[in-house]
Image (cartoon, grey):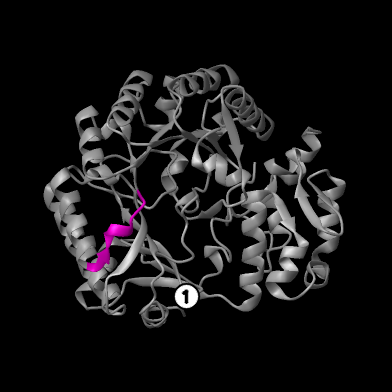
Amino acid sequence: MQLNRQIIEEYNVDGPRYTSYPTANVWTTDFDAASYTEALAKVKGTSNALSLYIHIPFCEKRCLYCACNVTIRKANPKVADEYIAYLGKELDLIASTFGERVPLKQVHLGGGTPTFLNDSQLDELWRLLNQYFDLSTVLEQSIEVDPRTVDAQRIRQLAVMGFNRISFGVQDFNETVQDEIGRHQSIESVESLVRAARDSGIHSINLDLIYGLPKQDAEGFMQTIEAVARIQPDRIALYSFAYVPWLHPHQKIMDAESFPDANTKVDLFLMARAHFLSHGYDAIAMDHFALQDDELSIAYKEKRLKRNFMGYTTLSTPEYLGIGVSSIGYVSDCFSQNTKDLKDYYRRLDHGELPVDKGLALSNDDSIVQWVIQRLMCQFVLDKDAFEAQFGVEFDEYFVSKLAELKVHEDSGLIKMDASKIVVTELGQLFVRNVCMSLDQYFTPKENQFSKTV
């Protein structure tokens, strides 16, 4: 891997993470509740299962690094009870367009802090889901968990309720870093929760880590990496810190001068990658790791891996619904995002209106580029023959205006190209976002729009 300071400086630019294409910044308010209703109506009568994402926005305290849509509330059953009632209103509006209970394949609870909901509230949420959907087809029921909010008994109860995949947000075990980001949890507490999950039969356990946080250095981060490898979750997500204070002003509280520079940040990632690879994990696409016998690793090797707003997945359905404030769905070749404002979310539902803030109906060109970027992000290989079979046009002909940019990436060692395929190199895997930016029909360099790619 020919990594040097020049390449890091050249490619450390603002760029999308490509959890979607087209990216959310080009979605438009012209796509409204009526547009989404029209897209949902096309699902009516289908026997294909959907995936469902439910956003629970509440946190008792804000973590300073966080770039998620959260609402700070002290623990109060009335807060969650009210929110669940409004989720029921949204579900009723969505399901009314279907005419029947559509089967679900995946259900994912994200946030915020989904465990802000107590057990009886989760039971009520599942009662609502069962009212509007066929849950007998669900294969994966997953939840994101803040380790500070649960104990072993709560984890066991989640297993009883049917959750078979759980993701713990760790970020870093180093106390100095934890002081900087306002989030503390010990190695011992996380280890006990993972043990409880395993003993309860939860078959897939993930730990989230973030590199690039304030005051992270090689020595401290290695201690976190070693602890995570000892705990041995089935999967590890190793995310680059997204510093976007223009979107989330609370990030300004952190001292930007204490962030590791781009070179150090890359070193932290490479150090973690090497350690995990030497301890039984496969590197999965851009920023994930999985034990070699995990279904995520198998799907990656078999080129079945998919990626959406719920992360890398083996069970992704072509269409998925998002409910709750700020949630995102993809139905009938249309993206839709709910309003990010909780009061506005409630107001719209009180008026019998789906709380859509913006979205986009994909053009044929959008679908073509989406297909290409999905393969580069998930598989690091683009088969030009498969592209032609899918779309009836040669890759080099369709992307003729982009070939010069791809050649620049080839000269930099990020990709290898020939007549039949494009392969992202080991070096290019660090900068795959930059490669995809070259194919993005909408992207123009602009400050304060995306996080840095390094």
- Residue 313 vertical position relative to residue 373 in the rendered view, above or below: above
As drawn, 415 above or below 440: above
Q: Is residue 446 visible?
A: no
Left or right: where 123 falls relative to 431:
left
Is residue 392 shown above or below 54?
below
Q: Position of residue 441 (x, y in %)?
A: 69, 68
Is 441 situated left or right of 103 in this image? right
Spot occupied by residue 13 in the image (x, y as percentages of width and height):
68, 48
Residue underneath mark 1: 332
Q: Which residues are magenta?
A: 132-140
Give how far across and how far down residue 306 sits, in percent.
Answer: 54, 54
The residue lying toward the viewer, choosing from 116 and 202, is 202
* Quarter of the figure that contains the C terminus: top right
Residue at point 65%, 59% (across, down):
373
Q: Residue at x 44, y 52 (%)?
A: 310
* In magenta stretch: residue 100: no
The answer to whether one can see residue 172 in this image is yes
